[in-house]
């Protein structure tokens, strides 16, 4: 379900026929163009999708005699359509508007071309309908890698992110990260609107990163590629010093590489995070330093 108000506002639509419903019964990001239905073919009709009427569909309707047009549209409105969007600011025939009002089906209008509006709306609905979770943490874009800094409050996530911003990287979200799964293996993190671009630094309070460092210091969204779990240094705990095997954590059913990052006074966390991001990029390009060392040792042992 999609909020009717949000749908109209976010897609910049003009409402031609209002509805009494607060939400639109949209459960899929896919759309339908009803050209075949106007021609009388209703087998496999995706009536549950938003209906997009472009210049071809509108030209066909307007070429029909009024009685025939009414017959065509009556059959079309027998289905519980979630909504209709008319592209290119085309003016619909009065029969369409009257039947839509009687069936309580909203009709919208947009100035965008049909193909552009279709692509834009599919992307919008994919985001809106994707599974969402809000995680406590800080998300930064480091060398194009989305790094989610996780850990208990006070461990230093915001301070590390602030140093990264100062070094030229971008903040996505601090304290709360809104994560959505837009495909089966891709996660996107954003900041909730009320706290967007804001960061909390203990002892100072809230600061506006965009106002302080400029628009290049923030970005609205980023894929989540790496989770760095920050924790106070524990002398009795074993920390991986080689990195031969990758540990993962699941977020919304998607496995994400997870690494522990012990925190203690004197460690330059920003440089460590930069190195972790660079190392992940190298691994994706096929170079794995730990495996390279293992192969060297194997070759030496067999010489």
Image (cartoon, rainbow, N blue to C red):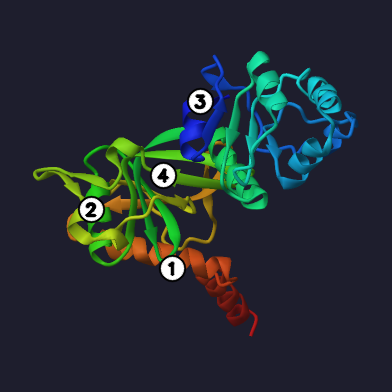
Residue holding disc 2: 209
Contact flag, marks 3 and 2 (Cβ < 8 Å):
no
Contact flag, marks 1 and 2 (Cβ < 8 Å):
no
Q: Callout 3: 10 Å neighbours few (<14), some, many (20+)?
A: some
Q: Nearer the viewer, residue 276 or 6?
A: 6
Residue holding disc 4: 190
Residue holding disc 3: 3
Residue holding disc 1: 278
Which of pointers 3 and 1 lies earlier in the amino acid sequence?
A: 3
Mark 3 element type: strand
Contact flag, marks 4 and 2 (Cβ < 8 Å):
no
47 in relation to 142, above or below: above
Which of pointers 4 and 3 lies earlier in the amino acid sequence?
A: 3
Image depth: mark 1 or mark 2 in front: 2
Q: Residue at x 38, y 67 (%)?
A: 275
Give the CA distance from mark 1 to mark 2.
24 Å
Q: Position of residue 103 (x, y in %)?
A: 68, 15
Give the CA distance from mark 4 to mark 2.
15 Å
126 in relation to 2, above or below: below
269 in relation to 34, above or below: below
Q: Position of residue 153 (x, y in %)?
A: 25, 37
Q: Using residue 237 as the reference point, say whether residue 7 is left or right of it.
A: right
Q: Callout 1: 10 Å neighbours few (<14), some, many (20+)?
A: some
Which quadrant of the figure contains the N terminus?
top right
Give the CA distance from mark 4 to mark 3.
20 Å
Residue 233 visible (yes or no): no
Image depth: mark 4 or mark 1 in front: 4
Give the CA distance from mark 4 to mark 1.
22 Å
Check the image and name the residue furthest to the left.
203
Mark 2 element type: helix
Q: Position of residue 299 (x, y in %)?
A: 62, 80
Q: Using residue 117 as the reference point, say whether residue 224 is left or right of it.
A: left
């Amino acid at each position: 379900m999609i909020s009717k108000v949000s749908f109209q506002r976010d897609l910049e639509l003009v409402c031609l026929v209002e509805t009494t419903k607060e939400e639109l019964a949209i459960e899929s990001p896919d759309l339908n163009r009803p050209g075949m239905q106007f021609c009388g073919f209703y087998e496999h009709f995706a009536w549950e999708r938003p209906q997009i009427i472009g210049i071809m569909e509108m030209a066909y309707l307007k070429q029909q005699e009024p009685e025939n047009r009414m017959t065509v549209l009556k059959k079309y409105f027998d289905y519980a359509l979630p909504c209709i969007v008319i592209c290119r600011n085309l003016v619909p025939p009065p029969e369409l508007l009257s039947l839509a009002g009687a069936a309580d089906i909203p009709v919208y209008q947009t100035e965008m071309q049909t193909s552009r509006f279709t692509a834009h709306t599919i992307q919008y609905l994919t985001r809106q309908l994707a599974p969402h979770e809000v995680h406590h943490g800080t998300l930064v874009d480091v060398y194009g890698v989305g790094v989610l800094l996780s850990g208990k409050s006070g461990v230093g996530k915001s301070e590390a992110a602030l140093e990264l911003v100062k070094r030229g990287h971008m903040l996505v979200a601090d304290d709360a990260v809104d994560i959505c799964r837009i495909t089966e293996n891709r996660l996107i993190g954003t900041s909730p609107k009320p706290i967007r671009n804001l960061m909390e630094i203990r002892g100072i309070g809230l600061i506006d990163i965009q106002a302080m460092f400029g628009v290049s210091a923030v970005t609205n969204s980023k894929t989540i590629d790496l989770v760095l779990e920050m924790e106070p240094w524990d002398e009795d705990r074993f920390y991986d010093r080689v990195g031969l095997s990758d540990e993962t954590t699941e977020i919304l059913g998607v496995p994400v590489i997870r690494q522990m990052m012990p925190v203690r006074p004197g460690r330059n966390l920003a440089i460590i995070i930069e190195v972790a991001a660079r190392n992940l990029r190298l691994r994706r390009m096929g170079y794995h330093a730990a495996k390279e060392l293992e192969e060297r040792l194997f070759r030496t042992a067999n010489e």
